[in-house]
Image (tube, rainbow, N blue to C red):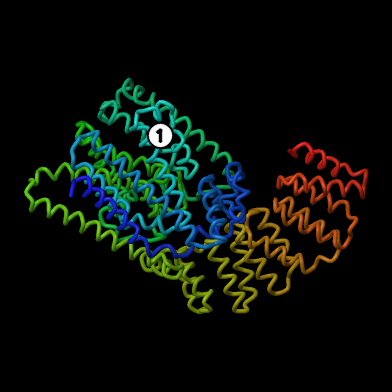
Amino acid sequence: MSTKATYGLACAAAFLAVVLTYSNHFRNDFHFDDAHTIQNNLFIRDVRNIPRFFTNAATFSSLPANQSYRPLVTTTLAVDYRLGGGLRPVMFHVTSFALFLAQGIALLVLYRRLMDASRPHPMNRWLALFAATWYALHTAIAETVNYIIARSDIMSSLFSVLAVLIYASRGRARTWHLYLIPAAAAVLSKEQGVMVAPILFAYTALFERHLSLRDLLRPRDFLATLRPTLPAFVVCTGILLMGMSLSTNYNPGGERWPYLITQPYALLHYALMFVAPVDLTADTDWQPFRTVFDGRVFVGVLFIVAAIGTAFLTSRRKISRPIAFGILWFFLSLVPSSSIIPLSEVVNDHRMYFAFVGLILSASWAIGLAVPRLGSAPRVNVMLTAAALIVLAAHAAGTWQRNIIWRTEESLWLDVTERSPKNGRGLMTYGVIQMQRGNLARAEEYYNRALQYTPQYAYLHVNLGVLKGAQGKREDAEHHFREAQKYDARNPVAYFYYARWLASIGRTEEATVLLRTALELSPAHIEAKELLDSLSATRLTTPEQWLERSLRQYQGRFFDDSIASSREALKLRPDYAEAFNNICAAENQLGRYADAITACERAIAIKPDFPLARNNLAYARSRRP
C-alpha cells in the first residue's frame, strides 16, 4: 500500500474515532445557560427574527444580564429550532458537532502548514494528524462540545482558525483581505474572537518576517509587523465595540481586583488540565483570591513567567517557532476571560476550548523535535506509534465518560456537587432536580447547604420560595421571593416564579403586575408571556379588554399575538375600528403589507376620520412592492 493511501486511511480512522467517541452525546439534555438562551428564548422560535439578532443583543437571552452580542450563534439556534421542529436537543447537538468536525479538519491543515513553514519534512503530515486528533479527542474539549450554548466557543474558534489559514495562504484570498470574513464571524460568534487579530500579528512576526519576540520589542519591527494585520485589528475591534454598545443590559459580574489576581493561577489550572484533565467540572467552586499575598498568586505568576520565557526562547530559531506560536495562542485566547474584565466565574472549563488550539500545537511540535533524537529503528517507530495511540485512546475513554456525565441534568449536577462541594449554585441546581422529582426533603437539604456558601444568591431564594410554597408555608415562600428581588432586582426570574406562585393561590392581580414587570425586563421570556396570556384570557370579557391586551402585545413586539387579540375583540364588536388598526400596525411590523392594507381600509371604512389608521395605511402602501 502506498504511503499516500496509508495516510488517507489514517485520516479516515481518526475521523471515525472522533465520531464514535462522541456517538453517545447526541441525546444529552439542555443544561445551565441553555435554559435562558434556548429553551426560554422566544426569539429563536421564528427564523424571521434572524435580522433582529444582528441589531438587538436582547435576542440572545431571556435574562437581561446575559444579553451579550452573539448574533451568528443565535442564528444557528433559530435554524436548529426550525429544522428540529422545536426544542429537540439532538438537532442542536448535530449542528454543534458538525462545526466541531469542521474545526478539526481546519486544524489538520493549519498545523501541517505551520510545521512545514518551520521544517519541511514528510513526517509533518503525520504529526499534524496526531495533533488534530489529539485536540478533537482531548477530554477537556468535551466540556464545550456537550454544552449546546458553548457552541459560541466552537464557532469563534473555527472562524479564527479559518482566518489564520486564509491569511497564511498569501494568495489572492490574502490580497483581497478575504480572511477578514471569518475574522469578523469569529467576533460575531463570541467576544473572544477579537483575539484573532493579535494571533495574526504573532503569525506574521514569527513565520513571515522571521522575527523573535525579542525583535518585536524594537518599535520599527513592531510597526512593520502591525501594518499587514491592521485591517484585522480595525474590523475585529469595530465589531466588538458595536456589540458592546448594543449589549446595554449585559452584566458579567464579579469584582475587578480579586478576579484579576486569581487569573494567573487559573491559567496554570488550564495548563494542568491540558496535561491531565482529571478535575473537570461543569461548574467550579473557585472563589476569587482576596489578597496578592495568597501563595497561589505567586505560583500562577511563576507559571506565566516560565511560559512566556519559553516562548521568547523558542521564538529565536525558525525550527522551534511553532512552540512559541502555540504558547502565544494559549495566552492571547484567554485574555478576554483572564484579565481585567471580571466575569461571574473565575474559572470555567469551556474556556480551554479556544486556548488548547495553541497548546496542542506547542506540545505536538515539541514531541516532533524530540523524536529524531530517539533514533529511527523500527522498534522506536513502533513504540512511538503505540504511545501516540495510548494517549489518544485514554482521552477518547475520558471523553466518552464525560459525555455520560452530561447526559441528564441530574447526572451532571450530581457530578458538580461531588467535584465542587462548596459550589452553592451546583448544590441548588441538584436540589431543584430533586424538587422536580417530588423529593422535597432532599431538595431542602441541598438548598440549606447552598445557603452556607451563597446566602445572597437570588436564584436560590427563588427556589426556596417555590419549595416553601409547595410545603404550604406561605409566609416563608413570600419571604424568599422578596429576598430574590432584593438581591437581583433586574432578574425577570425573581418576578416570574413569584407570580406563578401567587396565581396558584388565587392572587391573580398581584401576579399580573409581576408578570408585566418580568416582560418589561425580558420581552423574550416565553414562560412569563404564556402565564400572563393565560391569566388575561380568563378575565377578558369585553372588546376593550382584548384591545388593551393587543396593545401590550404590540409594545412587547409579539405581533402575531397582538393580531390574534384584536381578532378576539372583533368577535365581540365587528365594527371596532381600533382593532382593525391594531391588526394593520402589527401586519406592517411583520412585513405583510397586503394584509395591513386590507385591515386599515376596514378601519377607515368604519371610522373615516382616523389619523392613525390613515398613517398606517400610507406606510403599508409605500412599502408594498
| Residue 451 at least partly seen | no
Tell me if 208 is positioned left or right of 557 in this view: left
Q: Residue furthest front?
A: 1
Tell me if 106 is positioned left or right of 575 in this view: left
Disc 1 residue type (three-letter): Ala
> Depth check: 344 or 12 in front?
12
Residue at position x 40%, y 37% from top? 163
Residue at position x 39%, y 27% from top? 172
- The image shows residue 479 at horizontal and vertical percentages of 62, 68
Residue at position x 20%, y 54% from top? 388
> Depth check: 468 or 525 in front?
525
Residue located beneath label 1 in the image: 197
Q: Work out whether 220 lies above or below 405.
A: above
Local packing at callout 1 (Cα closer than 10 Å; few below 14, some 14-19, many 20+) is many
Q: Work out whether 223 lies above or below 423.
A: above
Q: Residue furthest top?
A: 220
Tell me if 465 is positioned left or right of 18 in this view: right
